[in-house]
Amino acid sequence: MNDPVGVGGVPSTAVGVHQGGLDRSVGFIGHIALVLSDITPTASLLVIGPVVILTAGTGSVLAYILGGFIAVCIALCMGELGSMYPTAGGLYSIVTQVLGREVGFLAMLDYMGQAIFLPAIVAFGVGTYVTSLNPNIPTNLTAAGIMVVVTILALFQIRFNAILTGIFLLIELLVVTALTISGLAHIHQPLSILTHGVVASGNGLAPVSVSIVVAAIAVALFSVNGYDSAINFSEETTGGAARVGRAVVTAALIGIVFEVIPFVAVVFGASNLQNFLHSTTPLTDVARDSFGSTFVTIIIWGGILAIFNASLAITLQFARIVWAAGRDRAWPEPVSSWLGKVSVTRKSPWVATLVVGALATILCLQSSLVTVVTFTSVLLI
């Protein structure tokens, strides 16, 4: 792909590139770290994985495999679009430039919904696992507290956050690897759970239908979602526009591999299928059966750090989208001017960050994990 560099290091072939005052200081590795933290294999497995299992039972294996295949196809399209339109507004800006401001405004509203719900979902994940360690700690208050801390960190310079997410990402991949080993160490389920799938029903099990598996694909897609965030960070990364497309596809492939393989391994490693399908924490239950409670405690604390990292990366991403909407004057004045503000010293979109963080914090206090996951899956589709 041609990638000549124009004025100021911006590719001359890129259509619709904006100069909005963000700090272009993140290299390719930092870019991948931010995007993988947004995909967050550990947080997705520990928070969204149980929802897929609750929905489709053993059919969740097929849902994850099919969801991963669809995600790869989408990522190839996203990568091409990201190379053509490297802008912090991401898909909202792309839709606006290709289909016009009216349709673009609808795309922005969809993203605004995701900007509120997605950070809250991941914060709920921290709350859920903290509560599993100490039942006296309310999930909602923990999630809201996490969102406050994440919002403060998201106000810092993007290079600092790229390094921070990279460190947390290494811990996250170790956690996912440990989950994979716990499943593969003791394979208990036969391949027939794929052809004769079952799902939790009352106190027992019932056959899972094809329609339920298809419905679960939407949630599995949500689980591996986030690779398009590479486009949202494109105005803060070094190099040409083609590098944005490579970051989309590279992060998608790594993220999907680190989700699908551990998920399949854990399902086949379940010793008691009925208990597994009825559990609220099925993945860590398998780890406990394989290596004991101490191992699970380490996994949970590593997962909490990974989930925190995901909440930070997702907040950073959606703050850029909200900021781009303000910069592009998508809202009436003075709203657009406020949302489009960038900190002089940190070069971060501080007003947009505060808006995303505050709304997500309120949602954490007022909702539940299953509600926000289900609603966000609809927005994603």
Image: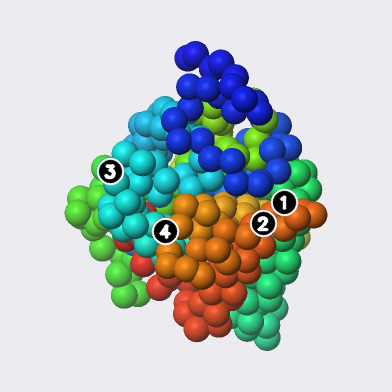
- Count the marks: 4
Dividing the picture into quarters, in which one does residue 352 lie? bottom right
Dividing the picture into quarters, in which one does residue 238 lie? top right
What residue sits right under mark 4 in the picture? 330
Dividing the picture into quarters, in which one does residue 244 lie? top right
Report, in whole angstroms, how far the alpha carbon at label 2 lies from the one at label 3.
28 Å
Disc 3 or 4, which lies upstream in sequence? 3
Amino acid under disc 2: Val
Label 2: how many Cα within 10 Å (few below 14, some 14–19, many 20+): many
Would you place residue 94 above or below residue 279 in this image? above
Disc 2 or 1, which lies upstream in sequence? 2
**Foreground residue, 278 or 68?**
68
**Residue under the point 45% across and 36% down:** 16
What residue sits right under mark 2 in the picture? 342
What residue sits right under mark 3 in the picture? 99
Instruction: Find numbered disc 1 in the image and state the secondary structure of the residue it sits on.
Output: loop
